[in-house]
Amino acid sequence: MTQTAFTEPEERVALREAVKKLAGKYGREYVDKQAREGGKMTEMWLEMGQAGFLGVNIPEEFGGGGGGMSDLAAVLEESAAAGAPLLMMVVSPAICGSIISRCGTEEQKQRWLPSIADGTHLMAFGITEADAGSNSHQITTTATRDGDHWVLKGQKTFISGVDEAQSVLIVSRTEDAKTGKLKPALFVVPTDAPGFTKQPIPMSWNAPEKQFTLFLDDVRVPVDALVGDEDGGLWQLFAGLNPERIMGGAMSCGLARYALDKAVAYAKERSVWKDQPIGAHQGIAHPLAKVKIELEQARLLWQKAAALYDAGDDFTAGEYANMAKYAGGEVACNATDVAVHTHGGNGLTQEYGLGNMLVAARLGRIAPVSREMILNFVAMHSLGLPKSY
């Protein structure tokens, strides 16, 4: 192994420092204020876009930085570690940007990628359905060709940020004329299209980004709204789902870093026994040390997954992207729990801002894919065990 095998290139280290500086201007206080008052992360989002951080994975010829998923995930991890995670980075530049970059026509790339890169066009992603859940093979939203249009009909649920998006990349199904079987296909649908409506889902944690149920009642979109080939199959979908898992793992690692930093600082300052800080006691120190180890393991996993994706090894990237998402979700939950416990009663006060993070971190174990489905994937594909579902 070379000396630099487990270090990031200088350019990415500099990128992290620049993101840390910008995100630090906003921080947790800004996020909490926006959430309480019904605001959005728009100001920070646009500044991140203007700085080139949102589009680091987009090709240079389409207004991006020409980097890869490793760079974009580093941006998200740093913003989360500064207390200001941008959930829509997982969706707009990572999922939608990746799918359009890899599967879109030249005209589609010219139309959408530059504004996705600078943040002026936010594209949401619609795959989950109430009756499909973790089984995306059961999606029932359909697209039917009608002359020079497609007509979409169906419902989606738990779709993030639709109220601040200009369009949604909808995962639908078209019918094979020969077999009658339904096949996945992706369509860019404007959020102001006739027949497209949204309904907010009340959630039990406060965040600027809201969740929605979508209703598509005979929504008509032009033929060129189809991204990729209607016969392209699942690979087009996973061009975006692997980045989604990598970004989910990176964001969870950023949340864990934020919680751990707060806990360590408190453990160094808080003193209740003989003028010794509570961090001197193993009952406090060991759980924090354990989280640190788990965090570094999770970070290595998402970095490897991103490197494999950037190298074009989609299958192996999928394996490690799933493991990275699992590890990130676990450490985020563990870190926030330990941070709250380190603070004692203060950990659940609004002043210290950790209580709400407990629920937010728990999302990493559920979405975008449950840890049980990840274990199924690893058991089947990594270990060669029989399929269990």
Image (spheres, rainbow, N blue to C red):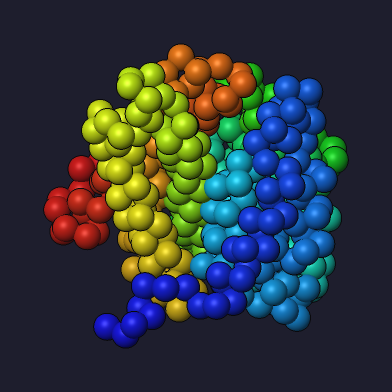
Outermost residue, bottom direction?
A: 2
Q: Say how many tags the image has.
A: 0
Position of the N terminus by quadrant: bottom left
Q: Position of residue 389 (x, y in %)?
A: 25, 41
Outermost residue, front direction?
A: 274
Q: Nearer the viewer, residue 80 or 195?
A: 80
Residue at point 40%, 57% (across, down):
299
Q: Position of residue 136 (x, y in %)?
A: 45, 44
Q: Is residue 61 above or below residue 309?
A: below
Residue at point 38%, 19% (across, down):
272
Kindly indicate the quadrant of the structure image that contains residue 165.
top right
Is residue 327 shown to the viewer in this render?
no
Q: Position of residue 353 (x, y in %)?
A: 58, 26
Q: Nearer the viewer, residue 223 or 349?
A: 349
Judged left or right of residue 75, residue 26 is right
Residue at point 53%, 38% (across, down):
128
Kindly indicate the quadrant of the structure image that contains residue 264.
top left
Judged left or right of residue 21, residue 326 is left
Is residue 28 shown to the viewer in this render?
yes
Kindly indicate the quadrant of the structure image that contains residue 107.
bottom right
Judged left or right of residue 342, residue 169 is right
Q: Is residue 42 above or below residue 52?
A: above
Q: Position of residue 144 (x, y in %)?
A: 67, 49
Q: Nearer the viewer, residue 362 or 309?
A: 362
Residue at point 78%, 25% (across, down):
38
Q: Nearer the viewer, residue 358 or 27?
A: 27
